[in-house]
Amino acid sequence: MKYDLERAVADSRARIGIQPARRPASAPRREGPAYVKGFETLDSEVEVEQASVLGSIPAWLTGTLVRTGPAKFEVGEQKFNHWFDGLGMLHRFSLSNGEVSYGNKYIQSRAYLHAMENDQISFREFATDPDPELFKHVSQGFEPHGTDNAIVNVVRIKDKILATTQMPVPIEIDPVTLKTIGGFDFEDNLPDGFTTPHPHVDGAYLYNWTISLDRPVSHNLYRFDGTKRELLTTIHSEAPSFVNSFAITKHHIIFVEQPYRLDYLKLIAGGTAFANCLDWRPDEPCRFWVIDKSNGEVVRTFETGSFFFLHHINAYEDGDGFVVDMVTYQDPKIISSLYLDNLRAGGSIPVPQPRRYILNRVDGKVYSRPLGDSFLELPRINYERVNGRPYRYFYGFGGYGSLLPGASLTYDFANSLVKADTAGGVTKIWQREGCFPGEPVFVPRPGSSGEDDGVLLALVLDSTVEKSFLLVLDAATMDEIGRAELPHHVPFTLGGEFFTQEELENPGAVRAQRARSAADYFEAVQHIPELNTGQLGLSRFLRR
């Protein structure tokens, strides 16, 4: 009997009182799925001093949300191929006293400037490769190894705000004016051909990986104290693994080497896009590297069957080993499904499955199970409080329903914001007719005591009017508090961060206070049964 996943999802939604979204009769008619506007170019750059607010914005919510993502999908007569290719745009939401202002600007990267000057795609993007013969006359207009198109994330390094991608030189930006300041150079000799756009901050250090294509090819872990980078460990590889994120615990770094390998000789030779140089090897294992973050020593490795992932959720140390939570897929078909032609046609997209991996130090084995019954991507947690520690809640955009390996959904794959409970509690969601949300960013309430005491900020496309709004949700209940409406649509973004006003003005003092608060919370939750590491870790897993 064939399993009807879409029917199962519909049944699950009906049980919790959610009806499928329907397009109002007055909505614009267009080709393709309702969410297709999120993959259309936005040319206008605007400043909105006071956005229209429906509901209310908490008075304590003071600061700036900055998001980045692809916003221009054509240059002249040329078109980008993939969602991860479009030229990057920044979006800024400043919140104060219940009011919201908004601005957006294209990142003045070399990729953008050369494209605008020559009316041609000038840099190799993830899945789009320009013809180098067309750009021999352009000084530095064609880069054989890639782009500085910083569309993936926004992070703070020391007192600077950076837009990042997998390339090793992030772009410094002004979070208030959105002015592009320039490339951020670490000014050292560490090997770095590529990097991950999702570094971790722990105490006084920022941790991240680079991939060096100099022989012998290697993955390199470093920590950065705001002044210089220190190389902690090097893992050599015959062919480097595709790395988008990694995990951190109280004492360790956990790096998952998946069998999605880069043919670096093909990449260096040129003539094809980065995506075409990746090779899936399903017969190879996924290898978990556990590294002491104080000295870079490889403590242990674990192996399990192949799977693909883009994002970690969280990780922590258990008495019997390590707990590593990730959003996973059977294989990297998710990458090919994000080509723009497929997205705009409403093509199928593999379902992301949150999954818990238990690395057992006693028997050396890896155990795993699904983490709840929701499917979601771009996961977020209360980072300042629970990153690298036992935790209960995580958030993302996706949907709700039962899953089977390899299943695909179309049309409404991302019509919900999801709150998942690692302790087995009820999954909570937000959903509205014709609305398609992006990544939710958790902002804790000042003086909060609970892990979910705060709000979620998410950009949402309302397909019924083809415009976007900033949504504010109660992170505990998933109830809508308010929204700020924008004058145009915002193409779906990939990453971003919220910076409090105090953090922008005095980042050092804020980081120190957050570190103390996280330590106090970690001490307090040791006595809460639902957050006991044994209950959430291997002992609970083996009892199932």
Image (cartoon, rainbow, N blue to C red):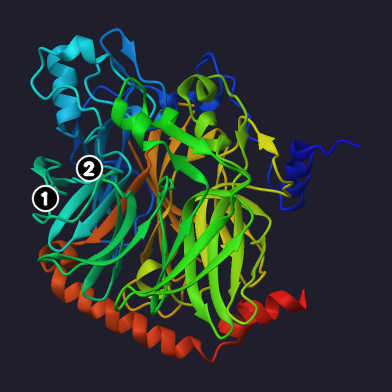
Q: Which comes sooner in the sequence, label 2 or label 1?
A: 2
Q: Which mark is residue 42?
A: none
Query: Could you tell whether 68 is left or right of 340 in the image?
Result: left
Is 299 drawn above or below residue 245 in the view shown? below
Query: Could you tell whether 333 is left or right of 98 in the image?
Result: right
The residue most toward the right is 1
Q: Quadrant of the C terminus?
A: bottom right
Is 296 drawn above or below residue 181 in the view shown? below
Q: Which residue is mark 2?
A: 50
Tag 2–tag 1 contact (CB < 8 Å): no
Q: Nearer the viewer, residue 425 or 250?
A: 250
SS under mark 1? loop
Q: Nearer the viewer, residue 374 or 254?
A: 254
Instruction: Point out residue 543 in the picture as x, y percentages from the top left corner.
Output: 76, 79
Instruction: Point out residue 200 in the picture as x, y percentages from the top left corner.
Output: 32, 64
Residue at 54 percent of width and 92 percent of height: 527
Q: Which residue is mark 1?
A: 185
Q: Nearer the viewer, residue 142 or 533?
A: 142
- Label 2 – label 1 distance at C-alpha: 36 Å
